[in-house]
Image (cartoon, rainbow, N blue to C red):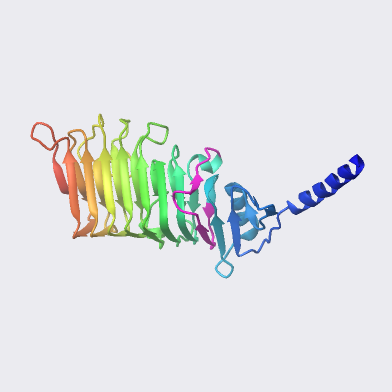
Amino acid sequence: MLKKLIGLGLILGIIYSTSSIAARDDSAAIVELRTSCFELNAVIDNCFESLDELNTWIQGTRNPGPTDPLVVRIGPGTFPGFFNCKGDQHISLIGSGSIHTSLKRTGAGYGMLSVMELKDNCNLSVQDLKIDNIGGLGAINVADTTTSTFNILSKWENVEIITTGYTWVEEHCDPAITGSKHFWTGSKLTSFTDGSTFGHFAKTYVSCAENWFHATEITAIKDVDTSSVQVAALLILGETHVYGGVIRAITGNGVVLPSPAPYSGGAGPQGLVAIYAANPGANVHVHGAGIDVLSDESNDVAAILTENNAHVHVMESSFNMSSCDNSQACGGTLQRIANHG
């Protein structure tokens, strides 16, 4: 009887181990990213349990183009790793909600700085997930170079990004080399300081491309006093449209900054600024949005700072600005527009 049980166990073990090997179609149109590819005593085919493994397969094997795009359905859970979209790749990432699905910085390799890198003519659609880059430099890095074509098309819906440093940054940010367009709907982008290597400034979104924000919150928060003198939500050198939503720049107790002005020590202005537009190619339109610039200390603040013949057009929007308690004894200068050429 014991020998029969042992034999039965070996047979079941063989069946189980054979059935636990997932099949993977290298031309699959839809794949899964899950914390486990085993469900209801069955293996899920075309499934990955690691963001890095998925990315390696996409870049090394699948390489989805315009005629064979790829959809990645992502289940609940946290997925550390790094993801890139390049060449003429066409990829859709669909999570299980920004509360339940998180792509997270790993702290190794490229993932030490970012969670995503976009380049070339990448076509990317992302929805219903969170990108966590706390401790990193830029959650989404756009690797534009002067020697490459640069016509990215990206769409973001119900996406939350939280990071130290930048939520979105274009490496060279040269309007002359980009024909890219980015669309954001119902999303939340937050940059904050934590005093770490990259968390000493808060500059949320830096772009030279064409950007469209609908009902989206863009926030820069500096609540830790660091060596950086920069806090800005939107830093624009290209064309940007904001409809609804809110643009916020906020500092906390003990954070003292110079007056808003052009700054030669880094990208963007110095001081506390919600919208920064620079150079003649900068064209910013804001309609029906809230613009908040809030300082706990008596800092001078500016909702909009322009320089070098930039253009900003704001209609039917509210300005909420404060410095300390806004009294003569405790409060800096509040400027809707700080115009520097």
Q: Is residue 127 visible?
A: yes
Would residue 270 be seen by someone viewing this image from the given angle? no
Residue at 20% x, 57% y: name it: 317
Q: Of 260 and 178, which appears nearest the observer?
A: 260
Q: Residue at x 35, y 46 (%)?
A: 204
Q: Residue furthest bottom?
A: 67
Image quadrant in which you'd find residue 66: bottom right
Q: Position of residue 325 (x, y in %)?
A: 14, 36
| Residue at the far left in the pictured view | 328
Quick check: 24 left or right of 158? right
In the rendered view, does 27 fall on the left or right side of 105? right
Magenta stretch bounds: 84-108
In the figure, 56 relative to 136: above or below?
below
301 within the magenta span: no
Q: Position of residue 55 (x, y in %)?
A: 59, 52
Image label count: 0
Q: Position of residue 89 (x, y in %)?
A: 54, 62
Q: Residue at x 63, y 60 (%)?
A: 62
For residue 170, side relative to residue 244 (left or right): right
With 28 as the anchor, is 337 left or right in this view?
Answer: left
- In what quadrant of the picture does the N terminus appear? top right
Q: Is residue 106 magenta?
A: yes
In this orientation, which residue lies closer to the viewer: 337 or 146? Answer: 337
